Image (tube, grey):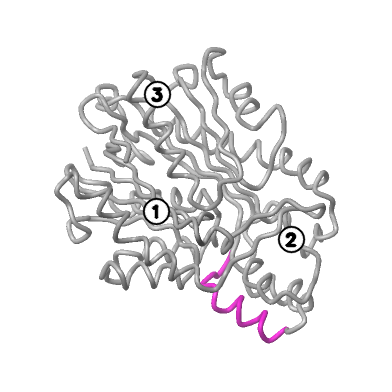
Amino acid sequence: MVAVGGSGGAVVTGGASALPPAIDQEELFEAFFSGRFTSARLARAAFSAAGIRRRHAVVDPRVEDCSSWTTARRMDRFVEEALPLAKAAVADALAAARLEAGNVGLLAVVSCTGYATPGIDVLVARDLGLSPRARRLLIGHVGCHAALPGLAAVGDFVALHGEPAVLCCLELPSLHVQPADDDPGQALVHALFGDAAAALVLEPGPAAARRKGVGGTGSLELLATAARSDLAEADQMTWTVTDRGFRMHLARHVPQAVGKALAPLLDELLAPYGLRPSDIDRWAVHPGGPRVLDTVADRLGLGEEALACSRSVLAEHGNCSSATVLLVLEALCAKEPPRRGEHVVLLAFGPGISLYGALLRGR
């Protein structure tokens, strides 16, 4: 567990997101995906069960079928599309925190859907006017849970160096539509994922008193993060680089693996603060899919309202990999500003199979 709370710890003082154009889920299936799988019935069932009404995509396959593109071509398009989204999310997060870009000590960029050198971190730092002395960190190919190890890293930096930091999660899975085949699992993968960028600003505790907070709605102190991995299940969720982009595999029992690790993860995260799951005021849970959310609700005894923002983000954006849990946090704060003393838990899950949690408290 990493603990960074206290008067000198890290506080979230700004947050924002940026999205490409939206695509209706039903229209996407009928116009493009319905004829790409051996069993149209199973594919339709996967799209219907995903719990998604629409998703956002930089590449609309109805207009541009990128399934035959080489990985090199997809990476070229990644840089073209990723930079404006990342810049918008980071700039708006800085504006919400009322912080000048030149005061940022660290910019951390998280992505598992595209790569370039110079990276998006370099290009954002250049275009937004970060100081030449600002540090940069790229967290690549970690997966859906990567926002939380990213949050731990920037939180540790803020607590140690006493300087502000920015975390930007940027994912464009629409660039990785795969060639048509007879693998029914690919129907589920193609039904779930959407594109998004989301950013958070973290500042030292004393400086945070002058900031307005997430989306301008308050501030959240980062108390601790924790991790739990079931390494015996590492092959159940994979994200493989191929000559035709990145190909995902999801095993059917991933929700059960997540459920099994929840109790020990939360005990490590909450017990040092004398808390139990029933003491948590709000939950920002990564909506990996409806079954994952159902499992979390069942294991933790959460009512429907507790995961309402997670389900809403899934319905309106799909699973946006690492950016998703930050979208849920943004939705929670937009719904009602965090009150002083409220406890918020972020949970995210990804390859490993790994679970990460973060405990925050309203200031």
Tell me which label, 1 or 3, sits earlier in the chain: 3
Q: Regarding mark 1 in the picture, which secondary structure is present there? A: helix
Residue 234 seen by the camera: yes
Which mark sits nearer the N-terminus, 2 or 3?
Answer: 3
Amino acid at circle 2: Val
Query: Between marks 2 and 3, how big is the CA–CA gap?
Result: 37 Å
Query: Is residue 52 shown left or right of residue 266?
Result: right
Kind of residue indicated by mark 1: Ala
Magenta span: predominant SS is helix
259 vs 56: above or below: below
Position in image of residue 73 (x %, y %): 83, 45
Give the amino acid type for the residue marked by disc 3 in the picture.
Pro
Q: Is residue 108 left or right of residue 23?
A: left
What residue did someone put label 3 on?
A: 164
Q: Can I make out residue 219 in this image?
A: no
Is residue 46 on the magenta stretch? Answer: yes
For the image, the number of numbered tags is: 3
| Residue pointed to by mark 2 | 177
Q: Give the Cα separation between the discs numbered 1 and 2.
A: 28 Å
Residue 327 at what x, y percent from top left? 45, 51
Check if residue 28 falls in the magenta segment: no
Within 10 angstroms of label 3, few (less than 14), some, or many (20 or more) residues? Answer: many
State which region is magenta: 40-54
User: Residue 348 sits in which quadrant?
Assistant: bottom left
Residue sitting at x 36%, y 55%: 284
Left or right for 127, reference 203: right
